[in-house]
Image (tube, grey):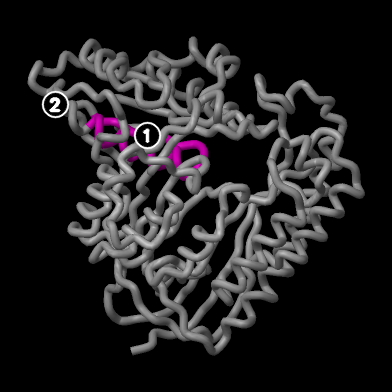
Amino acid sequence: MKPKFYIVTLGCQMNKSDSERMAGFFEKIGCVATDSEAKANILVVNTCSVRRAPVDRSFGFARKWKKWQKKNSKILTILTGCILPPDRKELESKYDVVVGIGEYSKVKLAVKKKYGLKKNSIKGEYDDYLDIMPHHHSDFSAFVPIMTGCNNFCAYCAVPYVRGRERSRSLRDVLTEIRQLAKKGFLEITLLGQNVNAYQPKDKKNFSKKNPYRHNFAALLWEIDKIKGAERIFFTAPHPKDMTDEVIDALALPKMVNYLHLPLQSGDDHVLRQMNRHYTAKYYLGLIKKINRKCPGIALGTDIIVGFPGETKKQFLNTLKVYRQADFDIAYPARYSARPGTVAAKMKDNVSLTEKKRRWLEVQKLMEKNTLQKNKKYKGNVVSVLVDGFSKGRYCGNSSEMKRVEFSSDKNLIGKIVDVKIDETLTWILRGHLVK
C-alpha cells in the first residue's frame, strides 16, 4: 500500500505554492495525498519563521503527532519551510526529518528508509524544486512562483535569512508553465515572489521583439497577457521601490486584475528608515497617484506593521494619515514581533503588547470603516467574478477587484468567470445577481 501524505501550510502564498510543489514531489515518488490528517502516514508542516505564531503552531503539531507515533510506528513527521536557525534548533528534536526549502533528496531518502518503496518508485533528482510540477488545489486558479529570496534586508524580516538572495526563474520556464496551465483550463494565474517586481531572468533574449517594455517584470506581464486561456493575472508581493512607470503602465493590460497589493508597512519616514524600506511616505503616495491615474477605480491593498521598535504615538498617527490619503480598500495590519537574527531584533522593543494591540485595533477599525465606504460605490455596478465556491445556497468568488461576491444561480458555475450586478454592499461581502 502506498504511504499517504498530509501537508499543513503555515505562512504566505509562497509557502502555499511550495506545499503544492512538495505534494507534486510526493506523488512522483509513489505516495498519495489524503485530506485526513488522522489517516496519513507522512505528516508535514511547511512552516514560516517570519512571525512567531507559525513557529508556536509547529510545536503544537509536533506534540500531537508524537502522541500518535506511540500508537503507530509507521508515522513519519517532517518539518520544512522558512525556518530561522534558532527556530530550527528549537524544533529539530520534535520532528523525524527537518529540511530546508526544496531539500527533497533528504525527504526522499527518509521516505525510502521508512517505507521501503520499490526502487523504481524513487525516481528523479531535483536540482531545483521549482522544476517540479505542483499538485494544484484548484482546477482553475494557480500560483506560479517566478522568483524566490530577497535582497532588501528589511530590518524586521526573516526572508533573506531563510530563502537567501533573490533568484529568478528563467522566462522560458515561467511562460512554459503558464501555457501548460492555460491548456488545462486554468483561468487565473497568480505570480509569486518575495520581491516579485524585481524579476531578473537570465534569458531576457526570449522576450518577444514586439514587447514594448524594457523593465523585466513589466515585460513578463505583457508576455503572459498574450497567452490564450489565461484570463486573469495577479501578482504578489511587489516592493514600492521597484514599482516603476513601466510596471504601473502594465497594470492596465487587458487581463490584469483590477487590484494591487502594495505594502506600506509605515507612514512615518523615520520608522521607514529604521525598517530599511528605501522610500518615504511622499514617494509612496506619489506611486498611488500614478496608479490611480493609470487605472481609475483600481482597488488597493497594503500591509502595515504597528509597534515597530521605537515607534511613537505621533509616528503611528502618521501611518493612519497616509492610510487615509492612499484610501486603501483593505489592509493586513500586524503587531511587530522580533525575529532572531534580524536587525530589528537588536533594537529595543519598547512598545508594550497592550499598546501594539491598541494600535492594531485602530488600524482595523479605520480599515473596516474605509472598506465599507469604498464598497458602497459598487452598488448597481456589474463586476467580473471568478466563481470558486458554493455555500448556503449561494455561489461565491472574487471580483477582479478581489472583492468577495455572493450570488444565486441554478447552474453549476464553479470555475467560470461570470458578470454579477451588485445589489447589496457589506464590509466584507458584495451580494448581487447574475447578469445573463
Q: In what quadrant of the picture does the N terminus appear?
A: top left
Q: Which mark is residue 61?
A: none
Hey, which quadrant is residue 398 in on the image?
Answer: bottom left
Question: Residue 310, relative to residue 346: is it above or below?
Answer: below
Question: Residue 317, relative to residue 290: is it above or below?
Answer: above
- Disc 2 on helix, strand or loop? loop
Q: Which residues are magenta?
A: 4-26
Residue 135 visible: no
Residue at image position (66%, 75%) is 374
Q: Which mark is residue 1?
A: 2
Q: In what quadrant of the picture does the C terminus appear?
A: bottom left
Asked if residue 12 is among those painted magenta in the image, a careful observer would answer yes
- Disc 1 on helix, strand or loop? strand
Q: Is residue 126 left or right of residue 385?
A: left
Pick whichever, 73 or 84, lies toward us: 84
First reached walking from the N terminus: tag 1 or tag 2: 2
Residue behind mark 1: 7
